[in-house]
Image (tube, coloured by chain):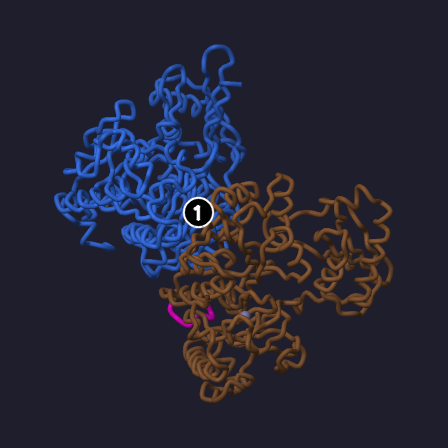
Chain colours: A brown, B blue
Amino acid sequence: MIWDKDIECLTHEEMQELQLKRLQDVVTRAFNEVPYYHERYSQAEVYPEDIQTLDDIEKLPFTTKTDLRASYPFGLFAVPQKEIVEIHTSSGTTGKPTVSGYTKEDLDIWGEVVARGLTMMGVGENDIIQNTHGYGLFTGGFGVHYGGQKIGATVIPISTGQTLRQIELMQDFNTSMLIFTPSYGLHLAEVMKEKGVDPKDLNLKVIGFGSEAWTDEMREKIEEKFGVPAYNIYGLTEVIGPGVAMECPEQNGLHIYEDHFYPEIIDPKTHKQLPEGKNGELVLTALTRVGMPLIRFRTKDITNIRHETCGCGRTLVKMDKISGRTDDMLKIKGVSVFPSQIEKALLSIKGVEPHYQIILTRPDILDEIEIKVEASPEIFFDNVKELIGIRDKLAQAIHDEIGLRVNVTLVEPKTIDRVESGKAKRVIDNRGK
Amino acid sequence: MIWDKDIECLTHEEMQELQLKRLQDVVTRAFNEVPYYHERYSQAEVYPEDIQTLDDIEKLPFTTKTDLRASYPFGLFAVPQKEIVEIHTSSGTTGKPTVSGYTKEDLDIWGEVVARGLTMMGVGENDIIQNTHGYGLFTGGFGVHYGGQKIGATVIPISTGQTLRQIELMQDFNTSMLIFTPSYGLHLAEVMKEKGVDPKDLNLKVIGFGSEAWTDEMREKIEEKFGVPAYNIYGLTEVIGPGVAMECPEQNGLHIYEDHFYPEIIDPKTHKQLPEGKNGELVLTALTRVGMPLIRFRTKDITNIRHETCGCGRTLVKMDKISGRTDDMLKIKGVSVFPSQIEKALLSIKGVEPHYQIILTRPDILDEIEIKVEASPEIFFDNVKELIGIRDKLAQAIHDEIGLRVNVTLVEPKTIDRVESGKAKRVIDNRGK
Ligand SMILES: [Zn+2]
Ligand SMILES: [Zn+2]
């Protein structure tokens, strides 16, 4: 089923026409209503009337997280505060958080795009969505909450944690969709196993996950453990929250709701647009946000985009799942390495569990990489000999992927810290210490 | 300002006419759609057509928390599950929780009643509501969230905890309304004082609180610390959530949204209705709930109701704030004591802080009551002599209130556990141990 066939199946030309009109509108509004844009555009000597085609977007300066912080708290709002009905912020681990303000129209757009995505995942009014994302300043929980209500599904806003309670409700309420971060999902699956609850005996039909980078290998583990397909939900608080792009049953990319969020892929160094299919930094323009227009926002997320006719029937541009973040990239012995490359290699080898840590040290002058990964129980306890073979295979697979030698340690099952809430900490960089 | 003058200022006769019509509707619907009611009413030989006047409500059996548990999870729903868009549950500390299911219409009613209440507290589209109630299965956060959005205020859904962050946002975002439980509010005030932040320097205008019983003396402390008026919000997850009744600026009772929630006060022993102004157990009937009609629900909350012309201009029936719960009542040496009586007595004496615990023991065959209460810093550290005088005054005030001798211990400031999330634990009953 398609939630809004008129939009989701537009021809590329029709979409571009709509995008251009909306881009012109939002640039005009930002220039007139938001001092930050007025100043930036005046400095760059680019004005709303210079946007004559979609390609003209390249004339506009980027907006970065640093710009948002400098405008803290309400400097990017394009409407009087009284029109803002909800505020979210990014985590803000260092310094002030970035702020996202929503008018009623913005909340409606947010619910609408998530409604499209949930419909795409086969979820409808008969479904019961158990939403384990946290509700609060962070946008996590609210996107699925608003979208789920819009399609008439039943939302259980349980938020993260209380894992035993989660399992009880899955059983009692016949939960058909789970929303979780991959790391919380793994934890949940593990506790279910301990308690003798087989996810396959439940009413579960589909999983939606987001808020964390993950590999295809991680998805396979999760689908295997829960016995249902798992689809990706992508978004950023600054742009609107989860729901900027969602994955269709083809499972080879996410449809970007490009009538609302215009994507570009740029080379993070040269800042030039890259051609379709080429990996680079995703830049997003919120074409319709009323409360807080965000133009050419540098997401730091690495992916690529492509226009193609999707097997699901939608024409909306697709992006690959995020393969890393520009600031996730590790420089190890001068080589660029993404944690996702290591995960991919790890999970390609049988006999290990998807719980691992990447520990970087510099004992002398050279970087060293230690990978701690949990062996599967049946191997660890019953088949000590095999462990050495697996360790060598892991080291080889990682070498093949990143071109560096690593020390692999297979550790006892369930000895790497689990995440009861929030995101897994995969990389421990002790090189400065 | 009055959000919905047509309803909030109806004459008593007009209101009764509306209530009777809605009562007849809901009883008919419950009888026809919900097996639980069909069975109970058939057993009691009372049928929808027996409801000819509002007084006929007394013919209907009560519904208790135990009945709700027996119907767990969805047994009281009057519509197919696909029409339910949100589910909340009560805390369920023992056994299964009680479940509350909402259709879109129910969420709209919920937002509507809270919108009336916030308007009554002087809050409007220019206000910034920092909502420290938790979001999740519990209804706490969502009532104010939906109501705040409805009036066009800006809601910051920060939820409980992260106290330093709360203070930072109050400063940065110019928060004009705080929503908290009294015990979290006290904690917040204390941390602000430690950090040298004076609430009176902020943009704060009003406080809304609920989810915990409190005394007038506790309200005075909170209003004194924050320098703004604090109003009560009452509700129960089973009935709809916070927003069943809210307090007007007269501060002498809460207006019940009686067009949606029909109140009765009964004697918890005889089950007979009590006359106006007399304390008893509040029984509520949700007249308009679509998803889950709740008829004659015994709240266990003790209060009284009265019809009067309020100074604020509203004609909606008023209830006193909850003075206790039928199951809060302590039997000590055969005497009935409510913790709120002790709080009232404690806070009437100068020199102590509103942090206390009531500890019950039975060293031999007789109950003993120890009250631990924090002395104010200036007294505790600088004026040891005065402590004895205060202790005696406290013991006397409590004796005057409950008629029993208690041992009072004045403890060092900040030595009684603070509540970072949820509700304070005031009573520790060790008598069985
Ligand atoms: Zn597709
Ligand atoms: Zn009043």
Report the front residue among B5 and B46. B46
Please say whether residue B251 is visible from this viewpoint: no
Which residue is identified by label 1?
Answer: B133
Please give the range of residues in magenta.
A74-80
Residue A397 image point, x, y percent: 80, 62
Please say whether residue A52 is visible from this viewpoint: yes
Task: Reply above or below: B337 against A168.
Answer: above
In magenta stretch: residue A124: no
Task: Reply above or below: B89 against B126.
Answer: above
Q: Residue at 66% across / 67% down in the picture?
A: A323
Which image quadrant is residue A433 in? bottom right
Q: Amino acid at mark 1?
A: His
Q: Total marks drawn?
A: 1
Residue A236 image point, x, y percent: 54, 65
| Quarter of the rendered structure image containing ligand 1 | bottom right
Q: Is residue B90 left or right of residue B244?
A: right
Query: For numbered disc 1, what is the local secondary structure?
Result: loop
Task: Reply above or below: B399 against A40.
Answer: above
Q: Residue at 54% across / 56% down in the picture?
A: A206
In magenta stretch: residue A77: yes
Report the front residue among A238 and A206. A206
Q: Residue at 47% across / 69% down in the picture?
A: A75
Residue A286 image point, x, y percent: 48, 73
Host chain of mark 1 = B
Which image quadrant is residue A255 in? bottom right
Report the front residue among B179 and B286. B286
Q: Residues within 10 Å of mark 1 (few under 14, many from 20)?
A: many
